[in-house]
Amino acid sequence: MKMQKLAGYAAIAWICLIVILLAIQVPFASRYGLTEQGAGLDPAKVAAAYSGSPMTFTVVSVLEILLGILFLFIALGLHERMRAKAPNMMRLLIIAASVSCALGIAGVMIAIRGLASMAGAADVSIYRPLLVMQSGLSTASDHALGWVDLLIGVAAISTRALPRFIAYVFLVLGILTVIGFALPTVTGTAGTVISIVVGFLIAIAMIWLGIVMLREREMSPA
């Protein structure tokens, strides 16, 4: 199977995995009172949730790692599709995607092992430094992912290898993600609405991307 086709299946699987994660996390967070603003910063609540269902945290961690790996496959497929007309950007794309995936996996591993240590030692003071480390790795991973999205958008627009809608969704998402660490966090109803709209656009773009990649057309050099 060529990498483009594999990337097409990976894009569709990525969306399916997001849906599965939401189906697990939303009711779980609601059950343990983690849906309230700032609840994730409360070590007592997080410790209670982990003690109540450690397997849920493990399953979510595995699925989050799979998300990163799937996105790396998508990046490899896009590299195959656009390398002829945008070789330098595609090389940078693979580097950024690899960095994002590695940092994301490291963050998930630190989080799950740290929570297990906190529960085993019955010491919630572990949570604060754990949260700082995990947050730093997650932010760095998201930043690298922003460059991946940005490179996809710019390369797709310049080579016309992807539909305009997909290209501009990745471009805008990339810009917002790259500078996201410096932007104020939007909370409340506005934050929820923005998240839903962005999530909806990403879902359409990824499904469409999957279909396009399954057609397995490589850009020929000019």
Image (cartoon, rainbow, N blue to C red):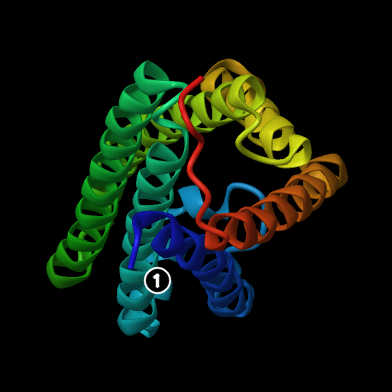
14 up-or-down from 175: above or below:
below
The residue positioned 65% from the left and 62% from the top of the image is 35
Query: Which amino acid type corresponds to the residue marked 1 in the rendered image?
Result: Val
**Residue 96 position within the rendered picture, expressed as x and y whole percent measured from the top left:** 34, 29
**Residue 24 position within the rendered picture, expressed as x and y whole percent measured from the top left:** 54, 79
The residue positioned 66% from the left and 24% from the top of the image is 157
Left or right of residue 144, residue 157 in this image: right
Q: Nearer the viewer, residue 142 or 208?
A: 208
Q: Which image quadrant for residue 61?
A: bottom left
Q: Nearer the viewer, residue 99 or 131?
A: 99
Left or right of residue 201, residue 17 in this image: left
Q: Is residue 68 in view?
A: no
**Residue 37 position within the rendered picture, expressed as x and y whole percent measured from the top left:** 66, 49
**Residue 177 position within the rendered picture, expressed as x and y whole percent measured from the top left:** 57, 28
Q: Is residue 36 in view?
A: yes
22 up-or-down from 7: above or below:
below
The residue positioned 27% from the left and 34% from the top of the image is 99
